[in-house]
Amino acid sequence: MRLDKFISKATELSRKEAKKILHASEVTVNDAVIKDPGLHVDIANDEVMWMGEPLSVATGNRYILLHKPEGFECTLKPKEYPIVTELIAVPELGSLRIAGRLDVDTTGALIISDDGSWLHRVTSPKHAHPKVYELTLADPMDAAKQEDVIKQVAQGILLDGDYEPTKPAHIEFIDETHARLTLEQGKYHQVKRMMGYFGNKVVALHRASIGEITLEGLDKGDSRFLTKEEIAQF
């Protein structure tokens, strides 16, 4: 890999900015000051340093789990709020994509990667990976109403504007205003629309897990790389 490209990938400097720090004698390769931006760098074996700090680039795809907090957009171009990738300290943020976006006010498990085909397998309803949501309702539901909701959700319901009913899902009520909903698809605003179908409103929503991946050990705003076992399930 060209040295200027290596620096750009490792630091998010532009190629033009990378050339400037090279010309300023700020970069060494294997302890030698290098100014030539076209020098070939062996990613696996050469030691590249900028102002005495080692630089490195990812040599493969990245698979990241983020515990999304409120107030962040799941988009690549911010509109009103900061974007979730600002919470992740890795280079080349622009190449990352999000699987199963969450609303600004929704918290929980968010998977981010630069492996497009793998992300498709995570989100595709054909692969039926369960996603568990914890929700708080505006209005309490008594036992009779809960039983009706459980039955209809298990059969599938036709949401306003859709041509096909939702896939069968499972909902478990914790109490009159709290429930856990397990889905194997991800329609637009599905959880909120499903509760709206029953004349209720979701006032708090949290995605607790995706497949076998949970948020155990992650506080809001924290992230980690997925394990090989977690990646292999999709």
Image (spheres, grey):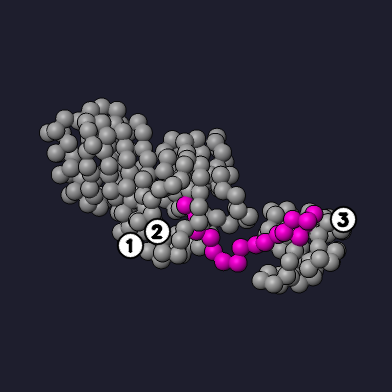
Q: Quadrant of residue 178?
A: top left
Observer able to see residue 163:
no
Residue 28 on the magenta segment = no
Q: Earlier in the sequence, mark 1 or mark 3?
A: 3
Q: Please tell me which residue lies in front, 112 or 188.
A: 112
Q: Quadrant of residue 57?
A: bottom right
Task: Note whether 182 is above or below 36 in the view shown.
Answer: above
Residue 50 on the magenta segment = yes
Percent across and percent down for residue 211 are 35, 56
Query: Which residue occupies 41% across, 61% down?
Result: 230
Residue 122 marker: 2
Query: Which residue occupies 37% across, 44% down?
Result: 207
Percent across and percent down for residue 209 are 36, 49
Residue stretch rendered in magenta on the structure: 49-65
Q: Secondary structure at mark 2?
A: helix
Image-based side of 212 in relation to 61, left or right? left
Give the residue furthest to the right: 24
**Circle 1 Cα neighbour tier, 10 Å, few/some/many (<14 / 14–19 / ≥20):** few
Residue, disc 1: 127
**Circle 3 Cα neighbour tier, 10 Å, few/some/many (<14 / 14–19 / ≥20):** few
Q: Secondary structure at mark 1?
A: helix
Q: Please tell me which residue lies in front, 60 or 78.
A: 60
